[in-house]
């Protein structure tokens, strides 16, 4: 996961954009190009990932990239064009951890309006405890609930998703959790 950057230059002609109300009656300030008039709309990005589980342990990845390099995360990243949320979550799990999984149900949907993101996590069953982390990951390993490095997690969405996961596991049933982080 990385954070989005606001538009600085026009994607059509490269001129520095200005944030202002467009002339078309729009009620929000947009990145408008003063040279060619292109309006650059910025909308929330979708981050997709998994909670990969093997028996009583969950797979976490130690980030090798900024932001939060060295912190632990569930495998997750930005959804790409031409894929579903589930396909994106599986792809990120493969790219970041090299983990063999069987995808499970949708588990958490977290709104993070302050950074303009929606995070979506699926449950997944690990088919093996062998991992082959990509360049974005220093280390991929399994943690029991007691071993989870709660103070060394990368993102609030990961913490909330893990908290709900272990609470549901104790309760013996997994729900779908919709969470607004403000
Ligand atoms: Zn332009």
Image: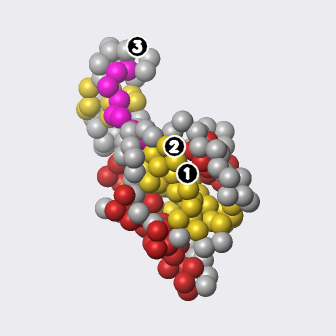
Q: Tell me if residue 92 can be seen.
A: no
Residue at 68% x, 53% y is: 130
Extreme residue in the bottom direction: 171
What secondary structure is marked by label 3?
loop
Residue at 34% in and 39% down: 26
Looking at mark 3, is its residue's CB closer than 8 Å to ligand 1? yes
Residue located 45% across and 60% down the image:
158
Q: Label 1's element? A: strand
Seen in the picture, residue 149 relative to 43 is either above or below; the reply is: below
Q: Are marks 2 and 3 in contact (CB under 8 Å)?
A: no
Query: Which residue position is annotated with label 1?
Result: 140
The label nearer to you, 2 versus 3, is 2
Q: Position of residue 168 (x, y in %)?
A: 54, 79
Q: Which residue is mark 2?
A: 137
Is 123 inside the magenta-drawn segment? no
Residue 8 on the magenta segment? yes
Image x and y of residue 86, in percent: 65, 53
Instruction: Name the foreground residue: 59 vs 118.
Output: 59
């Amino acid at each position: 996961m990385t954070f989005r950057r606001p538009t600085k230059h026009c994607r059509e002609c490269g001129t520095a954009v200005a944030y202002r109300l467009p002339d078309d009656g729009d009620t929000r300030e947009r990145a408008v190009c003063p040279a060619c008039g292109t309006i650059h709309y910025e909308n929330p990005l979708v981050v997709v990932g998994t909670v990969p589980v093997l028996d009583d342990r969950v797979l976490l990845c130690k980030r090798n990239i900024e932001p939060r390099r060295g912190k632990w995360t569930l495998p997750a990243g930005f959804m790409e064009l031409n894929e579903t949320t589930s396909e994106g979550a599986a792809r990120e799990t493969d790219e970041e951890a090299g983990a063999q999984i069987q995808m499970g149900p949708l588990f958490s949907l977290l709104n993070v309006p302050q950074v303009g993101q929606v995070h979506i996590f699926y449950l997944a069953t690990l088919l093996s405890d062998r991992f082959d982390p990509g360049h974005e990951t220093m280390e991929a390993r399994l943690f029991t609930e007691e071993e989870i490095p709660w103070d060394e997690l990368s993102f609030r969405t990961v913490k909330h998703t893990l908290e709900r996961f272990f609470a549901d596991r104790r309760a013996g049933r997994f729900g779908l959790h919709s969470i607004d982080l403000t």
